[in-house]
Amino acid sequence: MISVEGFTKTYGGFTAVDDVTFTARPGQVTGFLGPNGAGKTTTMRAMVGLTPASRGRITIGGHDYRAIPNPGRHVGVLLDASAQHAGRTGREILTLGAKTMGLPMSRVEEMLALVSLSESEAKRRLGKYSLGMKQRLGIAHALLGDPSVLILDEPANGLDPAGIRWMRSLLKSYADRGGTVLLSSHLLNEVELIADEMILIGQGRIVAQGDKKSLLAGQAASSLVTSLDNDALARALQAAGFAPEPAGEGIRVNCDTAAVGRAALDARVVLTDLREGTAGLEDLFLELTADTQREQPRPPAPQAQLTNGAQ
Ligand SMILES: Nc1ncnc2c1ncn2[C@@H]1O[C@H](COP(=O)(O)OP(=O)(O)OP(=O)(O)O)[C@@H](O)[C@H]1O
Ligand SMILES: [Mg+2]
């Protein structure tokens, strides 16, 4: 288990991570989610002793990472897939890792096969790898020592859709076998599908944490409904004490779908569409990290200006 207690990191007068506390448990995938610059990499670097904490403590299985003998056998780390010697081939990088950890050389071939790096790719130098290939090699390196804890910073970066799906099932089955997985992303949909637990961070602070259900639990009920007689349905909903309002082709109302169904049944109105209208996890994520989102870039100069310029 990874335990982060009051972790704070300051650079001069700037606080990059502010009093962050959470745990990543065995048997679970924990998603560490936040916009660019939120403090994810800083926290993960501190987990593996690459950055000292300004305050607080991070332990893995109760130990400081630096105090773990042969750490690769216990903690698999992927922080920056390019942070390897560009002149070494993929196979050499894994071989060096295996030698350092005292593993049989067969492990190298196993890992190359696991991440689907072909024979010719394994012979290629890292400097000539594509982003996705580097990422695959990085995942192979992290898994080399068959660790019980995985710390992966944006592992899906550069992977194609099939690669992302492959990684998802790999990490899920790893956690199902009792492993602890902490994986960061700035993309909610990458994490949402596999994370049992999510830690949302914005501007160095945790803004929410929990499983998907509990994160969404605080949201007020809302439904979107369309029927063959929206006016009659709105009247029925009003009579039932709710506040329907027009929304697109139908009605948005502040109650759950069962209450809408009941009102429709009573009023004998045929429903053509009924769904939950609560903001999804993405809206919640954007709302909670709103202060830290960057502005949308301005669209390019309008056509009119270009035409004027050309005249
Ligand atoms: N060595 C450093 N010196 C000064 N500031 C730093 C240093 N390392 C990181 N920071 C700052 O700390 C903040 C958090 O950076 P971090 O890399 O942890 O963000 P992140 O959540 O990983 O973002 P991204 O999604 O873009 O990878 C940023 O504002 C960054 O500029
Ligand atoms: Mg980062």
Image (tube, rainbow, N blue to C red):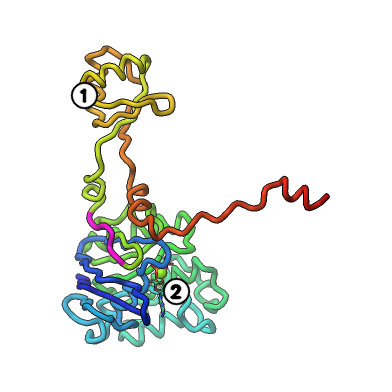
Crowdedness of circle 2 by 10 Å Cα count: few (<14), some, many (20+)? many
Q: Is residue 172 visible?
A: yes
Whole-percent x, y for residue 38 in the image: 37, 66
Above or below: residue 123 compared with residue 154: below
Per the rendering, the mark at residue 112 is: none
Mark 2 vs mark 1: in front: 1
SS label for mark 2: loop
Cα separation, mark 2 vs mark 1, equals: 57 Å
Crowdedness of circle 1 by 10 Å Cα count: few (<14), some, many (20+)? few
Per the image, the residue denoted by label 2 is 81
Q: Residue at x 30, y 31 (%)?
A: 223
Q: Nearer the viewer, residue 279 or 245?
A: 245
Q: Is residue 110 visible?
A: no
Q: For the view shown, which residue lies furthest in the left direction? A: 62
Whether residue 32 sits left or right of residue 158 in the image: it is left
Whole-percent x, y for residue 282 in the image: 36, 49
Q: Residue at x 40, y 55 (%)?
A: 165
Per the image, the residue denoted by label 1 is 241
Whole-percent x, y for residue 252 in the image: 34, 29
State which region is magenta. Answer: 205-210
Does the stretch in magenta take in 121? no
Q: Is mark 1 within 8 Å of ligand 1?
A: no
The amino acid type, in three-letter code, at marker 1 is Gly
* Majority SS type along the magenta span: strand
Q: Nearer the viewer, residue 103 or 181?
A: 181
Above or below: residue 255 compared with residue 82: above
SS label for mark 1: loop
Residue 206 location, quadrant: bottom left
Classify the position of ligand 2 by quadrant: top left, top right, bottom left or bottom right: bottom left
Who comes first in sequence, dot 2 or dot 1? 2
Q: For the view shown, which residue lies furthest in the right direction? A: 311
Residue 183 location, quadrant: bottom left
